[in-house]
Protein backbone atom coordinates (compact mmCIF):
# COMPACT_ATOMS: atom_id res chain seq x y z
CA UNK A 1 0.00 0.00 0.00
CA UNK A 2 1.24 3.48 -0.83
CA UNK A 3 1.38 5.97 1.96
CA UNK A 4 3.32 7.96 4.49
CA UNK A 5 4.61 6.48 7.71
CA UNK A 6 5.86 8.30 10.77
CA UNK A 7 7.59 6.88 13.79
CA UNK A 8 7.39 6.75 16.67
CA UNK A 9 3.73 7.46 17.37
CA UNK A 10 4.56 8.83 20.82
CA UNK A 11 7.90 10.26 21.93
CA UNK A 12 9.03 11.58 25.27
CA UNK A 13 12.00 13.88 25.54
CA UNK A 14 13.95 15.03 28.53
CA UNK A 15 15.14 18.59 28.79
CA UNK A 16 18.34 19.14 26.79
CA UNK A 17 17.92 16.11 24.54
CA UNK A 18 17.83 16.03 20.78
CA UNK A 19 15.29 13.66 19.26
CA UNK A 20 14.68 12.60 15.66
CA UNK A 21 11.26 11.94 14.14
CA UNK A 22 11.09 9.65 11.16
CA UNK A 23 9.01 10.22 8.01
CA UNK A 24 8.99 7.83 5.04
CA UNK A 25 6.80 7.87 1.91
CA UNK A 26 6.44 5.39 -0.95
CA UNK A 27 4.19 7.61 -3.08
CA UNK A 28 7.09 8.75 -5.28
CA UNK A 29 6.29 12.34 -4.29
CA UNK A 30 8.94 14.99 -4.87
CA UNK A 31 7.93 17.37 -2.08
CA UNK A 32 7.85 16.68 1.64
CA UNK A 33 6.87 18.87 4.57
CA UNK A 34 7.00 19.02 8.34
CA UNK A 35 4.28 20.78 10.33
CA UNK A 36 3.68 21.37 13.97
CA UNK A 37 0.16 21.47 15.43
CA UNK A 38 -0.64 22.87 18.86
CA UNK A 39 -4.09 22.55 20.48
CA UNK A 40 -6.64 24.85 18.88
CA UNK A 41 -4.20 26.10 16.28
CA UNK A 42 -3.67 25.52 12.61
CA UNK A 43 -0.70 23.73 11.15
CA UNK A 44 2.54 25.69 11.14
CA UNK A 45 5.23 24.85 8.61
CA UNK A 46 8.63 23.94 10.04
CA UNK A 47 10.59 22.85 6.96
CA UNK A 48 9.86 21.68 3.45
CA UNK A 49 11.83 20.01 0.70
CA UNK A 50 11.00 20.12 -2.99
CA UNK A 51 13.78 17.79 -4.12
CA UNK A 52 16.47 15.51 -2.75
CA UNK A 53 19.39 17.31 -1.07
CA UNK A 54 17.46 20.57 -0.87
CA UNK A 55 15.20 21.96 1.84
CA UNK A 56 13.85 25.32 2.93
CA UNK A 57 12.91 26.83 6.27
CA UNK A 58 9.27 27.36 7.00
CA UNK A 59 7.71 29.78 9.44
CA UNK A 60 9.01 28.21 12.67
CA UNK A 61 12.33 26.52 11.79
CA UNK A 62 14.27 27.68 14.85
CA UNK A 63 15.30 24.74 17.03
CA UNK A 64 14.66 22.17 14.29
CA UNK A 65 16.81 20.56 11.61
CA UNK A 66 16.09 18.26 8.67
CA UNK A 67 17.85 16.29 5.96
CA UNK A 68 16.69 14.94 2.58
CA UNK A 69 19.26 12.39 1.45
CA UNK A 70 16.68 10.12 -0.18
CA UNK A 71 13.46 10.91 -2.00
CA UNK A 72 11.51 8.66 0.34
CA UNK A 73 12.80 10.01 3.64
CA UNK A 74 12.62 13.37 5.42
CA UNK A 75 13.61 13.05 9.09
CA UNK A 76 13.12 15.93 11.53
CA UNK A 77 15.40 16.54 14.50
CA UNK A 78 14.03 18.52 17.40
CA UNK A 79 17.06 20.03 19.11
CA UNK A 80 17.53 21.23 22.66
CA UNK A 81 17.35 24.76 21.27
CA UNK A 82 13.60 24.32 20.71
CA UNK A 83 12.24 25.68 23.97
CA UNK A 84 8.66 24.49 23.71
CA UNK A 85 8.68 21.29 21.64
CA UNK A 86 5.62 19.58 23.09
CA UNK A 87 3.25 19.30 20.12
CA UNK A 88 1.80 17.03 17.46
CA UNK A 89 4.22 16.74 14.52
CA UNK A 90 2.88 15.97 11.07
CA UNK A 91 4.79 14.98 7.97
CA UNK A 92 3.21 15.45 4.56
CA UNK A 93 4.12 14.93 0.93
CA UNK A 94 2.86 16.14 -2.43
CA UNK A 95 3.52 15.33 -6.09
CA UNK A 96 4.75 18.84 -6.80
CA UNK A 97 6.14 21.57 -4.72
CA UNK A 98 6.96 25.16 -5.48
CA UNK A 99 5.77 26.17 -8.91
CA UNK A 100 2.93 23.67 -8.91
CA UNK A 101 -0.52 24.92 -7.99
CA UNK A 102 -1.80 21.40 -7.62
CA UNK A 103 0.20 20.50 -4.55
CA UNK A 104 -2.35 18.43 -2.70
CA UNK A 105 -0.64 17.38 0.48
CA UNK A 106 -1.15 13.98 2.08
CA UNK A 107 -0.32 13.46 5.73
CA UNK A 108 1.27 10.74 7.77
CA UNK A 109 -0.31 9.62 11.07
CA UNK A 110 1.79 12.02 13.17
CA UNK A 111 4.14 11.85 16.13
CA UNK A 112 3.08 13.25 19.47
CA UNK A 113 6.13 14.65 21.29
CA UNK A 114 6.05 15.40 25.00
CA UNK A 115 8.81 17.03 27.01
CA UNK A 116 9.19 15.57 30.48
CA UNK B 1 -5.42 39.85 9.46
CA UNK B 2 -4.90 36.09 9.35
CA UNK B 3 -4.18 34.70 5.91
CA UNK B 4 -6.82 31.98 6.25
CA UNK B 5 -9.71 32.44 8.66
CA UNK B 6 -12.29 29.97 9.87
CA UNK B 7 -14.89 30.13 12.61
CA UNK B 8 -13.57 27.84 15.35
CA UNK B 9 -17.06 26.58 16.24
CA UNK B 10 -18.25 24.27 17.45
CA UNK B 11 -20.87 24.05 14.74
CA UNK B 12 -23.63 21.74 15.88
CA UNK B 13 -26.12 20.26 13.41
CA UNK B 14 -28.69 17.45 13.74
CA UNK B 15 -28.18 14.18 11.90
CA UNK B 16 -29.41 14.43 8.32
CA UNK B 17 -29.03 18.20 8.10
CA UNK B 18 -26.67 20.18 5.87
CA UNK B 19 -23.51 21.41 7.57
CA UNK B 20 -22.00 24.58 6.08
CA UNK B 21 -18.37 25.38 6.80
CA UNK B 22 -16.83 28.66 5.71
CA UNK B 23 -13.35 29.97 5.07
CA UNK B 24 -12.00 33.33 3.95
CA UNK B 25 -8.51 34.11 2.73
CA UNK B 26 -6.51 37.26 2.24
CA UNK B 27 -4.25 36.62 -0.76
CA UNK B 28 -6.10 37.61 -3.94
CA UNK B 29 -3.94 35.47 -6.21
CA UNK B 30 -4.35 32.23 -4.28
CA UNK B 31 -4.39 29.28 -6.63
CA UNK B 32 -5.58 26.14 -4.92
CA UNK B 33 -8.01 25.45 -2.11
CA UNK B 34 -8.33 22.35 0.01
CA UNK B 35 -10.56 20.95 2.73
CA UNK B 36 -9.18 18.47 5.23
CA UNK B 37 -11.03 16.50 7.89
CA UNK B 38 -9.22 15.80 11.15
CA UNK B 39 -10.61 13.49 13.78
CA UNK B 40 -9.49 14.05 17.35
CA UNK B 41 -5.95 12.78 17.87
CA UNK B 42 -5.52 11.87 14.20
CA UNK B 43 -3.82 13.49 11.22
CA UNK B 44 -5.66 15.55 8.57
CA UNK B 45 -7.26 13.71 5.67
CA UNK B 46 -7.79 15.46 2.33
CA UNK B 47 -11.46 15.39 1.35
CA UNK B 48 -11.81 18.07 -1.35
CA UNK B 49 -9.67 20.19 -3.65
CA UNK B 50 -11.00 23.05 -5.76
CA UNK B 51 -9.13 25.27 -8.20
CA UNK B 52 -11.71 27.31 -10.12
CA UNK B 53 -14.77 29.37 -9.26
CA UNK B 54 -18.02 27.54 -8.75
CA UNK B 55 -19.08 24.30 -7.13
CA UNK B 56 -17.40 20.92 -7.02
CA UNK B 57 -19.34 17.92 -5.76
CA UNK B 58 -18.02 14.63 -4.45
CA UNK B 59 -20.59 12.38 -2.84
CA UNK B 60 -22.13 14.19 0.14
CA UNK B 61 -19.50 16.94 -0.03
CA UNK B 62 -19.69 20.13 -2.11
CA UNK B 63 -16.92 22.71 -2.19
CA UNK B 64 -17.80 26.21 -3.33
CA UNK B 65 -15.23 28.78 -4.41
CA UNK B 66 -15.72 32.49 -5.00
CA UNK B 67 -12.38 34.12 -5.77
CA UNK B 68 -13.87 37.60 -6.13
CA UNK B 69 -15.13 37.42 -2.55
CA UNK B 70 -12.07 35.43 -1.40
CA UNK B 71 -14.36 32.83 0.07
CA UNK B 72 -14.42 29.04 0.00
CA UNK B 73 -16.99 26.83 1.69
CA UNK B 74 -17.72 23.16 2.28
CA UNK B 75 -21.23 21.78 2.44
CA UNK B 76 -21.87 18.36 3.94
CA UNK B 77 -25.27 16.97 3.01
CA UNK B 78 -27.10 14.34 5.08
CA UNK B 79 -24.67 14.89 7.96
CA UNK B 80 -23.82 11.81 9.97
CA UNK B 81 -22.39 11.50 13.50
CA UNK B 82 -19.25 10.10 11.84
CA UNK B 83 -18.76 13.52 10.22
CA UNK B 84 -18.06 14.99 13.67
CA UNK B 85 -14.50 16.27 13.34
CA UNK B 86 -12.47 19.42 12.83
CA UNK B 87 -12.43 20.67 9.24
CA UNK B 88 -9.33 22.52 8.09
CA UNK B 89 -9.35 24.92 5.17
CA UNK B 90 -6.04 25.24 3.32
CA UNK B 91 -5.04 27.74 0.66
CA UNK B 92 -2.08 27.53 -1.67
CA UNK B 93 -0.65 31.00 -2.17
CA UNK B 94 1.17 32.28 -5.22
CA UNK B 95 3.67 34.09 -3.02
CA UNK B 96 6.40 32.13 -1.28
CA UNK B 97 6.64 29.37 -3.87
CA UNK B 98 3.08 28.16 -3.61
CA UNK B 99 3.21 27.79 0.13
CA UNK B 100 0.08 26.28 1.65
CA UNK B 101 -1.50 28.04 4.61
CA UNK B 102 -3.88 26.20 6.92
CA UNK B 103 -6.72 27.70 8.89
CA UNK B 104 -7.15 26.76 12.54
CA UNK B 105 -10.20 24.67 11.71
CA UNK B 106 -13.90 24.51 12.51
CA UNK B 107 -15.16 21.86 14.91
CA UNK B 108 -18.32 20.16 13.65
CA UNK B 109 -20.59 18.16 15.91
CA UNK B 110 -23.41 16.12 14.36
CA UNK B 111 -26.05 15.16 16.89
CA UNK B 112 -27.70 11.75 16.49
Image: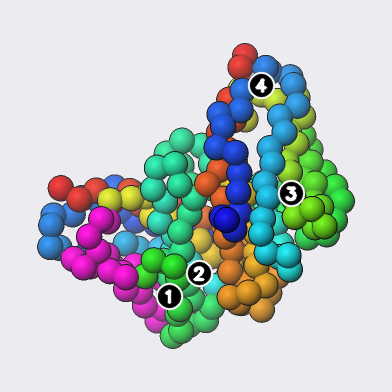
**Farthest front residue in view:** B1
Chain to which the residue tagged by mark 2 belongs:
A
**What residue is at 28 percent from the left and 51 percent from the top?**
A86
Range of residues picked out in magenta: A62-85
Which-is-in-front pick, marks 3 and 2? 3
Given residues A94 and A14, the one toward you in this image is A14
Circle 3 is placed at which residue position?
B72
Q: Residues within 10 Å of mark 1 (few under 14, many from 20)?
A: some
Which scheme is used to colour this image of the protein?
rainbow
Chain to which the residue tagged by mark 1 belongs:
A
The Cα atoms of the two marked residues, 2 and 1, are separated by: 12 Å
Circle 1 is placed at which residue position?
A57
Relative image position of residue A50 (x, y in whole percent): 54, 78
The Cα atoms of the two marked residues, 4 and 2, are separated by: 36 Å
Query: For the residue labelled by badge 1, is the local secondary structure a helix, a strand or a loop?
Result: strand
Magenta: main secondary structure equals: loop
Circle 2 is placed at which residue position?
A32
The answer, for residue A92, to whether it is visible in the render is: yes
Amino acid sequence: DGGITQSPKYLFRKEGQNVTLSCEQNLNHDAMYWYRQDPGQGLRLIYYSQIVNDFQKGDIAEGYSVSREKKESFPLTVTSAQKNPTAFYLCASSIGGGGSPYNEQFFGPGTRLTVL
Amino acid sequence: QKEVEQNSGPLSVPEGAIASLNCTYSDRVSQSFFWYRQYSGKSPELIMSIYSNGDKEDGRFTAQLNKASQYVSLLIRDSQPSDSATYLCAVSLRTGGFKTIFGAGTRLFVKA
